[in-house]
Amino acid sequence: MDKYYNSDKFKQTLRTYEDSIKGNKGEFLDSEELADIAEYYHLLGRDDEAMQTVDYAISMFPGAISPLTFKARMVLITEDNPELAEELAEEIEDKTDIDYHILKAEILVATNEPEEANEYLISHFDADQDQETMEDYILSCTEMFLDYDETKFAELWLQKSELTNDEDYKEFKARILKNKGQFKESERIFNELLDDDPYSASYWDQLSQTQFLQDDIQNSITSSEYALAIDPNDYTAIFNKANGLVRLGNYKEAINYYERYKELCPKQYKSSMSVTISHLYLGLKDPVNAKKWFDIAMKETNNRDETCAFFGMALFENDYIEKAYEMLTKHLPMVDKDWSLGYAYLARCCYELGKPEQEYQRYLKIALERSVDDCREALADIYPPDMAPEDYPKLPPLPYSRNEEQKKI
């Protein structure tokens, strides 16, 4: 969580607001302060209160940019509703404001049009502006693209900045390097930032993720613990520690941390966490609790087919092959056309269950179109060593004796 939300200034603003909704008179809060409170509630996973706060701000300050921008981003993230986000953007009175342009571009990115978003931002970039305004625009563009993992465009924008010693610049540079797999250099920059600001939970979170990606699991967990010492409710740190515990094979403790994460994280992540917990219970050979958490996920999800596909992959990874086959054949055809996961697992299910060669080859073809890496991971051991996945259709897989002792669930 941004350190601003732990500042005395914000805490006083929050007290003023919460006193006012209890009926106590207090000082007047402006639109930006109310938007900050809504953002704070969102970061705590209290989205209903966040929306109540921002709706109040919009009613009090029609056309004000901060609450409208926050609400538009909320409906993009939590409701996947770009049409409503666009309507809210058009209610903004000052359409010359940087945040308006960033929001318009963000809507394009959220609808899978990052190139159009980049062109839009370039068209509204004014190199004749004062240096401070221009740098604010550049770094805002960089951050928005980074938040959507559009690393190429984030890097193009950051290259325009001259503030190479600025904290934001360094952080964005480190995030870009991490996304590009340059983990050592990314780690070096985050350590440099922490030398200057050792109480930044956000930097510890980023360092933890960079260490995790290098398989430096123990140090990743240690970094997450530093973040939690600064902010015990830092759900990113809780998530990072849970991931580290999984890699160490400590599933029971990892489940405790994922449950804590679920209590704090925004609601759009809750269903996937329930599937993750279900997956871990499968690994603990506890199908009863696995089923319980899958049922919870199904109540939370906005996309039942995707949730079932994820659970099907979890079943496969824990050797519940027949049930995985059933789930994947039923739900993979129903997911979004851009969905890339699970088809290699389904092909492997066909192989292990002795399904007709034609069915295996059909799913192998789809799997290769969607993710060559998944094919390599799931199928490499049933083809000659060093054979490229693209060549798998040229040969039948190695003979397999069907296992009649498949796990049941």
Image: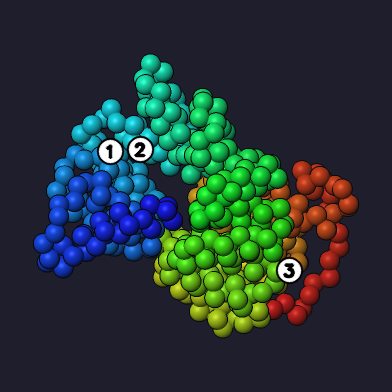
Among the two numbered marks 3 and 1 on one chain, the one whose residue lies closer to the N terminus? 1
- Mark 3 and mark 2 residues within 8 Å of each other at the beta carbon: no
Q: Residue at x 70, y 45 (%)?
A: 184
- Residue 353's mark? 3
Closer to viewer: mark 3 or mark 1: 1
In this image, 231 relative to 317: left or right?
Answer: left
Residue 221, quarter of the rendered image: bottom right
Q: Which structural element holds mark 2?
A: helix
Question: What amino acid is labelled 3 in the image?
Answer: Leu
Q: Are marks 2 and 1 in contact (CB under 8 Å)?
A: yes
The relative height of residue 166 versus residue 195 in the rendered view (above or below) is: above
| Image location of residue 92, percent across then percent down | 23, 37
Q: Is residue 112 left or right of residue 241?
A: left
Considering every residue shown, the one lying at the far front of the view is 196
Observer able to see residue 8: yes
Label 1: how many Cα within 10 Å (few below 14, some 14–19, many 20+):
many
Q: What is the x, y in percent for residue 383?
A: 84, 54
N-terminal-most mark, 3 or 2: 2
* Residue at image coords 70%, 72%: 249
Under mark 2, the amino acid is Leu
Along the viewing direction, whichever of 358 and 97 lies nearer the viewer? 97
Which residue in the structure is indicated by mark 1? 89
Question: How many numbered callouts?
Answer: 3
**Crowd around label 2: few <14 · some 14–19 · many ≥20 (10 Å):** many
